[in-house]
Image (tube, rainbow, N blue to C red):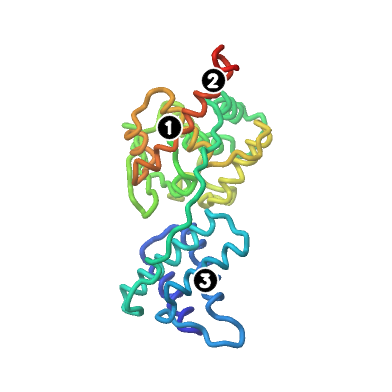
Amino acid sequence: MSELKAASDRYLASLARENASEHTLRNYAADLEQFVEYFSPPGADSAGPAQIDALALREWLGSLYDRDLSVVTIRRKLAAVRSFFRFLLREGTIPSNAARLVLTPKAPQRVPLVPTAEQTNALVDGIAANTLERPHPERDLLLFELLYGCGLRISELVGLNLDDFDFSERWIRVRGKGRKERQVPYGSKAASALKRYLAKRASGEPALLLNHHGARLTDRGARGIVKLYARILSGDSSLHPHSLRHAFATHLLADGADLRAIQELLGHARLSTTQKYTQVSLTDLMAVYDRAHPKAKG
């Protein structure tokens, strides 16, 4: 095993000990495997961590562009390598962090695609009607009520346990990115869905949402449920769990909620992350203006 591969394994093991999410571990493992392969060309000696300088890292970054990867993907891979190099510096494997000298590619500013309140409520109402005659309709409804009603990330949702709920005060303890905890309220519709689901649920499993085997519902399983209902009930196969998180924030903002309150509910570390929803609202406002105002048409 090369020195670089051994260092990568140590870093991934440290992430696991720090309780990094499965999603993070999976992505970082794949990104670092490709990184190690790049610096381990066939028929040549592998580069050691201390031999990889800023120039070598820029060449590696250029190879990602040559593969026609998206800027978002390249930024993620660079973030993984930067975190890896910070670890190497802490353990004394490298004398300085060359990854700090590599600029992050600028990502295009995208306005999230957000279903309207009418579209979202029609979807959730269709699930409540159980028109698809699914085997676990109570669970499926609760899944949507928490995604849209609380703005949870899909990883946060499937990570919920029964003891994370304060049933009397309607609060949920949510573990977000970096295992940071926050308290999120839930409304009457989610409370009603939760009550119906728990009445049907017969398991000693601590996880809230269960699959058909009675074990914790996985991230992939939850995404599949969202995709199924969206495709059949809404005819929109592009809808995904994060669309409901976007809808939660955008609809709150449209109804006058304070941006900082939305930031707290979403668990965003920076207000700038939350501010993208103001752009969504402005886009919607311009669309209304263009359709309705007589001066909008030249």
- Choose top left, top right, bottom left or bottom right for residue 67: bottom right
**Sooner in the amino-acid sequence: mark 1 or mark 2:** 1
Badge 1 crowding class, 10 Å Cα cut-off, few under 14, some 14 to 19, many 20 or more, is some
Q: Amino acid at mark 2?
A: Val
Number of residues whose C-alpha sits closer than 10 Å to that of mark 3, classed few (under 14), some (14–19) or many (20 or more): few
Residue positioned most to the front:
298
Circle 3 — which element? helix
In the picture, which quadrant includes the C terminus? top right
The mark closer to the camera, 3 or 2, is 3
Residue 59 - label: 3
Disc ID at residue 293: none
Left or right: 153 in relation to 129: left
Q: Nearer the viewer, residue 66 or 188?
A: 66
According to the image, label 1 marks what residue? 278
Q: Nearer the viewer, residue 105 or 244?
A: 105
Where is residue 246 shown, x and y percent of the image?
A: 49, 36
**Which of pointers 1 and 3 lies earlier in the amino acid sequence?**
3
Q: Nearer the viewer, residue 115 or 181?
A: 115
| 206 vs 45, nearest the viewer | 45
Q: Is residue 71 above or below residue 198?
A: below
The residue pinned by badge 2 equals 288
Q: Is residue 227 above or below residue 106?
A: above
Q: Is residue 7 above or below residue 194?
A: below
Q: Nearer the viewer, mark 1 or mark 3?
A: 3
* Residue shown at 55% from the left, 66% from the top: 62
Compared with residue 255, is residue 36 higher up or lower down, i.e. above or below? below
